[in-house]
Amino acid sequence: MNADTVLDLGRNAMYITLLVSAPMLLSGMVVGLIISVFQSVTQIQEITLTFVPKIIVVMVAFALFMPWMLAVFIAYVQPLFGGFDALVR
């Protein structure tokens, strides 16, 4: 295993991590932005108003996107484990 292979594996792992986490991160960001604008307009500064909807939306996004996230992750891991003997040599 040379340095190029290690760098390629690391780059692909970071890309897959970003891709798999994107639906939950983006949904939390959008809901946070909407709640922030709502708080600015109404001047309600309740701290739980930001956390509870974000948690609910992130959990819903996790449940909705789980089959896709699992498929992306498995598509990355199967060739990696399948070619493990070639990577070690």
Image (tube, grey):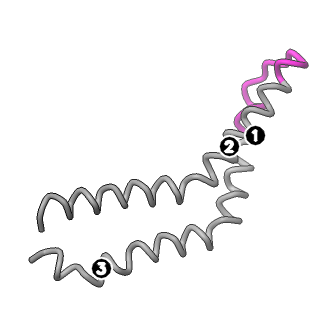
Q: Amino acid at mark 1?
A: Val
Q: Secondary structure at mark 2?
A: helix
- The foreground one among 1 and 70 is 1
Q: Earlier in the sequence, mark 3 or mark 2?
A: 2
**Mark 2 and mark 1: span between their CA atoms?**
5 Å
Asked if residue 43 lies left or right of residue 22, the reply is right
**Extent of the magenta region:** 39-51
In the rendered structure, does residue 45 fall within the stretch colored magenta?
Answer: yes
Q: Residue at x 81, y 25 (%)?
A: 37
Q: Please tell me whether residue 35 is drawn above or below residue 27 in the rendered image.
A: above
Mark positioned earlier in the residue sequence (1 or 3): 1
Q: CA distance from mark 1 to mark 3?
A: 37 Å
Q: Residue 11's quadrant in the figure? A: bottom left
- The residue that mark 1 highlights is 31
- The residue pinned by badge 3 equals 81
Q: Mark 2: which amino acid? A: Gly
Q: Please name the residue shown 45% across and 60% down the image.
A: 16
Would you say 56 lies left or right of 12 here?
right
Percent of width and height locating residue 7 = 24, 56
Label pair 3/2, CB-CB below 8 angstroms: no
The residue that disc 2 covers is: 28
* Depth order, front residue of 8/32: 8
In contact (CB < 8 Å): disc 2 and disc 1: yes
Residue at 29% in and 57% down: 10
In this picture, residue 38 sits left or right of residue 8: right
